[in-house]
Image: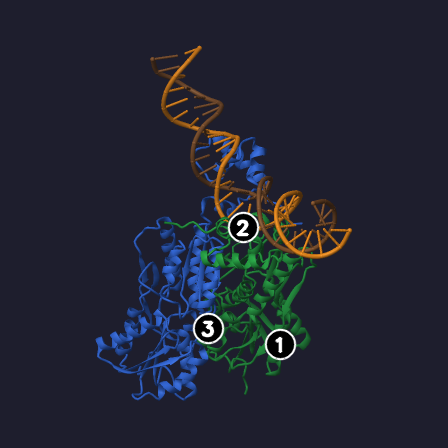
Chain colours: A green, B blue, C brown, D orange
Amino acid sequence: MRQKRVTLEEIAQAAGVSRATVSLVVRKSPLVADHTRERVERIMAEMDYVRDIGAARLRNNSSRTVGVIVPNLVNSFFTEFLSGVEDVMAQDDRVVLLANSRDDPWRQDAILQRFRGHGVDGVILCPAVGTEPQLPARIAGWGMPLVQALREVGPPLDFAGADYVAAVGLAVRHLVAQGCSRLAFLSVTARTSAREERLSGFARALAETGITNAGVVEADLTWEGAAQSAAQVLALGTRPDAVLCFNDVLAAGLMAGLRRAGCEPGRDIAVVGLDDLPLAELTHPALTSVAMDAPRIGRNAAGLLARRLADPAAVPQRDIVAPRLVVRDSSFQKV
Amino acid sequence: MRQKRVTLEEIAQAAGVSRATVSLVVRKSPLVADHTRERVERIMAEMDYVRDIGAARLRNNSSRTVGVIVPNLVNSFFTEFLSGVEDVMAQDDRVVLLANSRDDPWRQDAILQRFRGHGVDGVILCPAVGTEPQLPARIAGWGMPLVQALREVGPPLDFAGADYVAAVGLAVRHLVAQGCSRLAFLSVTARTSAREERLSGFARALAETGITNAGVVEADLTWEGAAQSAAQVLALGTRPDAVLCFNDVLAAGLMAGLRRAGCEPGRDIAVVGLDDLPLAELTHPALTSVAMDAPRIGRNAAGLLARRLADPAAVPQRDIVAPRLVVRDSSFQKV
DNA sequence: ATTCTGTTTTAGATCGTTCTAAATACGGGA
DNA sequence: TCCCGTATTTAGAACGATCTAAAACAGAAT
């Protein structure tokens, strides 16, 4: 039932030339004479030849395949990121092997081994929570080019991300301009570089503006978790008049929780998210957020990996996208 | 710089056995003696051996790789579906090649060729809008096992989807129970099997309940497109008191558009979505929707493909998940 | 005709695995 | 001791491409 594919040999036979010549045609080498190239190409088209990339890789060690590991396929930030990666890779005639680590370093390890077995040319990794800092070095030891994205462990290497310190700064300054003076931060339990960065951005922005830190509350990274944390937010020592959230998912959950508690977000308290997911437009009130252009980060990551593949010795590079404040209704109090 | 990998040959050398024996160990064949197996396995671990699946495929024709083609990575219905697929495939020690057709049949063709070149064992396809009905036959001609998901073209073959006819029925009956009597349907411009199924479900449900069809409006499958269609909905010959939408994204957009037009959804008019995306909880009012369990459909699709790979001659099977009505606030009028 | 260019083409080895078919080892039983 | 069956191991040929180094072929200059 399973067909066997047309091979170089068969094309060669049909065209009356050698395998090697056909191979040159496939790879668009300038060495072959025009008339031969034409004839061979015609025959390839007629016989529906498809080059076996696996076999090619065995010989020349390039599989035109890259692995992408994300911790999650539900949060649309990751899927938009993924979309950007896939986009560039497809343009470059590469294929994406996708895997979901579910934020589990153990699964992540298994995935890496699987990718290794499949001979990927390189990997784009958003490291799972709890990833050991030595991982990038270990991967390098395998001779596997690596780009980290969105999150990062270990010493600085190729990395594509967003400037969350600046993002938090934008948000804080906006809230201050709205007249807020007691800011809280809704953080997450999961320890990632993304979390540290936002927290340190928050501390710095408060210092720069001289505004009161009303406290930091932690929630599980789910809508429900955030909704439940509303009570803690309201019970903080100094009652905040604005809450900056780790991301839009938490912000949306928090708003729902606040309203349940009889506190109307956007009127009684300002709420600002980070990432500007599409859902920011759908919440009520519409959520003020800081846009990070996830697809762009994905494209950057793909670009970095391409660069690294082209020149394994290149000096490490970091591509950081700038944030953009998107003002909606959730931060308009005291109109 | 690029390391060369440890090969069977090297392991064989170190263990003082032949390549063939090591290969048997790798594949967990019962043929090897226990003491040899142990020794070889120990050495493999020590030397960090990783089997080259590409090379293996070249010989035995199974790459443990499957392609997945989705038309879109933004709509979370597709990404949840994808997540289900990836889940099962990972369990089964298979790897997912992901590609985004962007609903473009031409791109879709290019992707299929690329997958072919990579020697995927099979493909899960959600056909792009405008896909020719002969495509499944063509793919079969290549000897490439295929499962269609969510949408479908050509004669019935392996397919994983949801029962949208029933889903629409649930929604209509719910609206009728709420006292609605003039139903409109907000459809999409893109012609897919998914669209036809919902429309015919709508027609059938109206016939069964004897309710007035207030008309069908078409919108682009975007939040903005739906918002703009609100005017058309309100201008229908018979003014509808409920609108059933192609999916939640359209429903959310429509609600925004209605409110802009001074018509409060959930009070002046009922709105019901399909799919029950996470966003249904975030809209205001919270959106009544019919849940389709996208990850489950993904798992089904993966299961169907696994079955087909195991037995290429198996009779075609269709896995259809049942819908579940989730009542929220957008359909509670006349409380 | 011969030598010398430069352009095209090619035979054959090679990548790392699996398959086939056959070889070898090990225990009895005759 | 020899033979036979079962359990284990193996040599060598695949798989389909690419690489290397060399061969064949042109045309021009001698």
Q: Which quadrant of the figure has residue A204?
A: bottom right
Q: Nearer the viewer, mark 3 or mark 2?
A: 2
Local secondary structure at mark 1: helix
User: In whole angstroms, how far apart are the C-alphas of marks 1 and 3?
Assistant: 25 Å
Q: Residues within 10 Å of mark 2 (few under 14, many from 20)?
A: some
Please report whichever mark, 2 or 1, sits nearer to the chain's N-terminal start.
2
The residue under label 2 is A17
Residue shown at 67%/77% (left/top)? A209
Q: In the image, what residue type sits under mark 1?
A: Leu
Question: Does residue A148 appear anywhere in the picture?
Answer: yes
- Contact, CB < 8 Å: mark 2 with mark 1? no
On the same chain, marks 3 and 2? The answer is: yes
| Subunit under mark 1 | A
On the same chain, marks 2 and 1? The answer is: yes
Vertical side of A198 occupied by B24: above or below = above
Q: In the depicted view, which residue is nearer to us: B135 or C8?
A: C8
Q: In the image, what residue type sits under mark 2?
A: Val
The residue under label 3 is A257
The residue under label 1 is A170
